[in-house]
């Protein structure tokens, strides 16, 4: 299956959108464990624990399932962001022009990208029902600086591939952090890089920032972003 047909498949399957949201929210349960545990935990064990706890949260928290943006944003800010290298994720999505952006522009890009992800998939969260996650055998080494953790999500439909790229960060509050994810063969950052590059080529960095912020305002007003 080529990239174009796979993208069309993703657009048709609401469940894939749920998984993308789930990947963004995968760190929901990290607050249940001390930071030292997260730093010492193997990457596949970390993904397994967080994903299982995340799915449980989505199934039981009615406001999150209903797409409550404020509740989701609170969850993201307090539980997810400490476990994601979001600066790296945003920089990769923006591409080479990231290095030309001012610190203020970089902050606005990160804020806009985060809100885009949250709003894009919030409306699909109510589709989470009986899914279960299986972590495939880990082929890397805990001594590696960057690893790939492969998982498979099974529910009432076909199994869905959901993979994570993680990097090991130093320090007591370090540990493994997610910087990219793959849903059914499509890497999230790569998909957005193509879109962002077109926007930057047409309107520059400020144009991309304006577009991201406009989508956030549209979502806040209840219109389609």
Image (tube, helix red, strand yellow):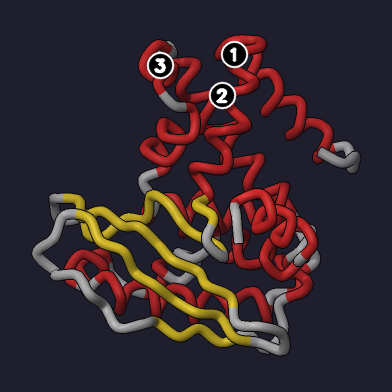
Q: Position of residue 54 (x, y in %)?
A: 53, 73
| Residue 164 badge | none
The CA distance from mark 3 to mark 2 is 19 Å
Disc 2 and disc 1 in contact, CB within 8 angstroms: yes
Identify the residue position indicated by label 1 in the image.
201
Residue at the limit of the structure toward the front, as seen here: 1
Q: Residues within 10 Å of mark 3 (few under 14, many from 20)?
A: few
Q: Quadrant of residue 56?
A: bottom right
Q: Residues within 10 Å of mark 2 (few under 14, many from 20)?
A: some
Identify the residue position indicated by label 2 in the image.
197
Q: Is residue 75 above or below residue 118?
A: below
Indicate the secondary structure of the residue bearing disc 1. Answer: helix
Q: Position of residue 173 (x, y in %)?
A: 22, 55
Disc 3 and disc 1 in contact, CB within 8 angstroms: no
Indicate the secondary structure of the residue bearing disc 2. Answer: helix
Q: Position of residue 187 (x, y in %)?
A: 50, 52
Residue depicted at x 77% and y 65%:
14
Identify the residue position indicated by label 3 in the image.
103
Q: Quadrant of residue 5?
A: bottom right
Q: Quadrant of residue 129?
A: bottom right
Looking at marks 3 and 1 on the same chain, the residue that comes earlier in the sequence is marked by 3
Q: Position of residue 159 (x, y in %)?
A: 60, 82
Q: Is residue 43 above or below residue 146?
A: below
Q: Is residue 150 above or below residue 5?
A: below
Q: Quadrant of the C terminus?
A: top right
Looking at marks 3 and 2 on the same chain, the residue that comes earlier in the sequence is marked by 3
The CA distance from mark 2 to mark 1 is 6 Å
């Amino acid at each position: 299956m080529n990239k174009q047909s796979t993208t069309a498949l993703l657009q048709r399957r609401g469940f894939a959108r749920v998984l993308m949201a789930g990947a963004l929210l995968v760190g929901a349960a990290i607050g249940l464990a001390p930071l030292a545990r997260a730093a010492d935990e193997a990457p596949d064990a970390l993904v397994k624990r967080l994903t299982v706890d995340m799915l449980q949260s989505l199934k039981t928290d009615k406001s999150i399932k209903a797409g409550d943006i404020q509740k989701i944003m609170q969850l993201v800010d307090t539980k997810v962001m400490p476990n994601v290298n979001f600066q790296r994720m945003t920089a990769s999505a923006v591409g080479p022009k990231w290095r030309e952006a001012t610190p203020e522009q970089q902050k606005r890009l990160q804020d806009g990208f985060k809100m885009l992800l949250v709003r894009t998939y919030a409306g699909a969260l109510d589709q989470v029902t009986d899914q279960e996650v299986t972590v495939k055998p880990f082929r890397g080494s805990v001594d590696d600086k960057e690893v790939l953790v492969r998982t498979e999500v099974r529910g009432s439909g076909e199994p869905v591939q959901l993979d994570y790229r993680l990097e090991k960060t130093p320090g007591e509050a370090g540990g493994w952090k997610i910087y990219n994810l793959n849903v059914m063969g499509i890497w999230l950052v790569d998909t957005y890089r193509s879109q962002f590059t077109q926007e930057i080529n047409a309107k520059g960095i400020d144009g991309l920032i304006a577009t991201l912020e406009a989508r956030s305002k549209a979502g806040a007003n209840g219109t389609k972003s």
